[in-house]
């Protein structure tokens, strides 16, 4: 009791505006998770930090060309909208850029990794109707993931419930879409199927595209276990791609396509099969195991500027096989143990050809293995903590000499040390309605793709270690829920692509704060919002890059924000407004040429339930604001050669759905 009082007094010193006395209501156990949508959702309450969940009711009315656009509501998640056919969108968190220069977050779909070998995220084999929830964790204290989880992870759960739905959509830019879901449980057998098809001409000229997604899942429940088979397939055809514009062209004719990009286009295909086994030994011990195989196949023709002498053909074929197992043991009411092991083997073929020149021809194998153990303790009814230790080992080999610009060389993988990563999370209830949380953890970055292999000294480069921490307060004030936190993350020798070359930029620091709230005023009105501020800096670098010291890292907006308003007129009519805000960023480490990328977009949605189903109207970018993705393709840090890709203007969709 004295310890709890001491904690309250310390909190009062730092947070004088918060009462230390609980209200006269039912005690509630808080966690640091913020949920947008239905509150009854499975969530990870062992992570003491910025955990955010978007539930199905906030996802299913969205209609997007790229599934990653569903992350717009999540605090601190930045969307990089390239708008270039199959390379169209990626997401980033915690002050990392979304242009693929630094893999930094793990994407897991139903517990299975869904990152390409270079860290890009792939989700276009899912449509919103088939997604149960999306969880984003920003931080370094999650021991369950290693590779790519430098700044956190994204966890997506597909639907596995009983239900039947068909939805058809038409919209601006000749958009046509159909989604369907079927789930049924009969005795011990459950089956789930989903399909999606979308096609359209796009906002800009020369952007015809279509995509298809199919999935099936079959599960049988035994007395103490369950076994499930899951399959997924996706294909995305970009018959054309609009290319990048100059700054002047982007502003004067944002819907135009670059003349030199008339031959751009491509397609990507995804195949997946996995087995999921869960065994409940007793009420205190359970084991899970997942085995999977999946393939990412991408073919793309691209020309970035008129000075590029010829169209470049890019081909990627990546097979990934893996196994994941975990054990949970509730030792007693106060102590719990979780341990796990995962392995993934990648077979990667990456090729780029431009005219008669072979710019890149890589064929290599790469394997990552990780093991972790986490102990959790609740020493009192107001305090709980968990500590973990994770170790990852990366190995690989080449299958042929690497070719770069027609020059072949024999290479070996860098000799990288085993990465030991301690993790720690702690929660302290200062009242029944206020929670202090804190975490600390270590994660890592590694050179990726061809940069993993060298013709020289295999000890010349090692893993870059990232240490991060976060401290925050989660509160309930009647119907108002708030979360405020400050975080910081430092890398000892960060690996990025600077001026077209993969290199270690040096010691870097990222820091900022996150704020979120949601409130239900009554049965009709509810509001949610979030704001994330990011500061990034190159602290110390090599002699060649000393001019960058003290500068911001490129491609990182200085803030993001979202605001959502929902009005329920009656049970059959719901209206929503969503405002999405992003700050500006530098396009190079030299911080020259100005800042780009800021915008404020307003979207709205109305759902009307009829006797036979639901009709939904969605309006995006209502005020037709200009926004763009900008990249500096210059290989000279003293020059700027920016290329620009405008985002979509005002557009609408109308949907009709039937639940059987």
Image: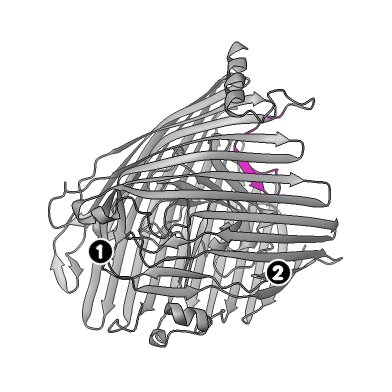
Q: What stretch is highlighted in magenta?
A: 28-41
Judging from the image, the colouring scheme is one colour
Whether residue 333 appears in this view of the structure is no
* Position of the N terminus by quadrant: top right
Establish if 291 lies above or below 170.
above
C-alpha distance separating marks 1 and 2? 45 Å
Decide: marks 1, 2 in contact (CB < 8 A)? no
* SS at circle 1: strand
Residue 185 in the magenta stretch? The answer is: no
Percent x, y for residue 379?
56, 18
Q: If you read the primary sequence from the N terminus, does the residue marked by circle 1 or circle 2 appear first? A: 1
Task: Say which residue appears at 54% left-offset and 59% top-offset.
Answer: 582
321 left or right of 600? left
Whether residue 584 appears in this view of the structure is yes
* Position of the C terminus by quadrant: bottom right
Answer with the quarter of the image where residue 369 lies: top left
Establish if 554 lies above or below 84.
above
Q: What residue did someone put label 1 on?
A: 363
Answer with the quarter of the image where residue 127 lies: bottom right
Q: What residue did someone put label 2 on?
A: 618
* SS at circle 2: strand
Q: Residue furthest top?
A: 2
Percent x, y for residue 372?
40, 34
602 left or right of 303? right
Task: Say which residue appears at 62% left-offset and 36% top-offset.
Answer: 223
In depth, the one of 463 and 631 nearer the eye is: 631
Residue 33 in the magenta stretch? The answer is: yes
In depth, the one of 47 and 228 nearer the eye is: 47
Answer with the quarter of the image where residue 607 lies: bottom right
Percent x, y for residue 602?
66, 65
């Amino acid at each position: 009791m004295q310890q709890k009082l001491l904690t309250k007094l310390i909190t009062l010193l730092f947070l004088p505006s918060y009462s230390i006395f609980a209200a006269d209501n039912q005690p509630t156990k808080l966690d640091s998770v913020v949920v947008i949508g239905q509150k009854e959702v499975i969530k990870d309450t062992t992570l003491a930090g910025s955990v955010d969940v978007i539930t199905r009711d906030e996802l299913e009315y969205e209609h997007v060309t790229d599934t990653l656009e569903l992350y717009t509501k999540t605090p601190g998640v930045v969307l990089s909208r390239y708008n270039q056919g199959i390379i169209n969108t990626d997401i980033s968190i915690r002050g990392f850029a979304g242009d693929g220069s630094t893999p930094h977050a793990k994407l897991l779909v139903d517990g299975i990794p869904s990152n390409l070998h270079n860290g890009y995220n792939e989700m276009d084999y899912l449509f919103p109707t088939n997604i149960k929830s999306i969880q984003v964790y920003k931080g370094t204290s999650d021991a369950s993931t290693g590779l790519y989880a430098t700044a956190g992870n994204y966890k997506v759960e597909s639907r596995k419930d009983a239900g039947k739905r068909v939805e058809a959509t038409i919209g601006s830019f000749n958009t046509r879409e159909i989604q369907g879901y079927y789930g049924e449980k009969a005795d011990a057998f459950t089956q789930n199927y989903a399909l999606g098809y979308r096609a359209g001409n796009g906002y800009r000229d020369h952007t015809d595209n279509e995509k298809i997604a199919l999935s099936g899942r079959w599960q049988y429940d035994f007395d103490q276990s369950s076994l499930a088979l899951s399959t997924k397939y996706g294909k995305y055809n970009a018959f054309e791609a609009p290319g990048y514009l100059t700054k002047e062209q982007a502003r004067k004719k944002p819907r135009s396509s670059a003349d030199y990009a008339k031959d751009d286009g491509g397609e990507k295909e995804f195949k997946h099969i996995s087995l999921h086994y869960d065994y409940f030994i007793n009420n205190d011990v359970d084991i899970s195991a997942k085995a999977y195989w999946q393939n990412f196949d991408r073919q793309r023709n691209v020309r970035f500027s008129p000075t590029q002498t010829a169209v470049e053909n890019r081909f990627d074929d990546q097979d990934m096989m893996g196994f994941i197992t975990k054990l949970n043991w509730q030792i007693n009411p106060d102590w719990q143990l979780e341990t796990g092991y995962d392995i993934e083997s990648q077979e990667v073929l990456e090729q780029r050809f431009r005219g008669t020149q072979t710019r890149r021809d890589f064929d290599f194998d790469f394997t990552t293995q990780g093991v972790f153990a986490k102990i959790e303790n609740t020493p009192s009814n107001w305090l709980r903590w968990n500590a973990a230790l994770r170790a990852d080992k990366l190995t690989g080999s080449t299958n042929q000499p690497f070719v770069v610009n027609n020059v072949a060389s024999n290479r070996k993988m860098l000799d990288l040390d085993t990465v030991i990563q301690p993790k720690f999370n702690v929660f302290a209830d200062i009242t029944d309605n206020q929670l202090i949380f804190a975490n600390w953890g270590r994660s890592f970055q590694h050179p990726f793709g061809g940069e993993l292999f060298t013709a020289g000294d295999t000890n010349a480069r090692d893993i870059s270690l990232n240490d991060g921490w976060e401290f925050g307060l989660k509160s309930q004030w009647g119907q108002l829920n708030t979360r405020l936190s400050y975080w910081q993350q430092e890398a000892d020798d960060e690996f990025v692509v600077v001026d077209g070359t993969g290199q270690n930029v040096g010691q870097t620091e990222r820091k900022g704060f996150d704020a979120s709230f949601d409130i239900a005023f009554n049965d009709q009105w509810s509001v949610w919002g979030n704001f994330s501020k990011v500061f990034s800096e190159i602290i110390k670098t090599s002699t060649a890059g000393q001019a960058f010291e003290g500068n911001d890292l490129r491609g990182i907006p200085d803030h993001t924000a979202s605001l959502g308003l929902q009005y329920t007129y009656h049970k059959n009519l719901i209206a929503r407004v969503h405002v999405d805000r992003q700050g500006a960023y530098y396009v190079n480490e030299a911080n020259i040429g100005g800042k780009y990328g800021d915008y404020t977009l307003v979207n709205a949605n109305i759902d009307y339930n009829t006797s036979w189903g639901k009709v939904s109207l969605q309006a995006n970018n209502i005020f037709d604001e200009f926004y763009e993705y900008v990249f500096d393709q210059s290989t000279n840090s003293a020059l700027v050669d920016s290329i620009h890709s405008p985002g979509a203007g005002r557009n609408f969709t109308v949907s009709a759905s039937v639940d059987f």
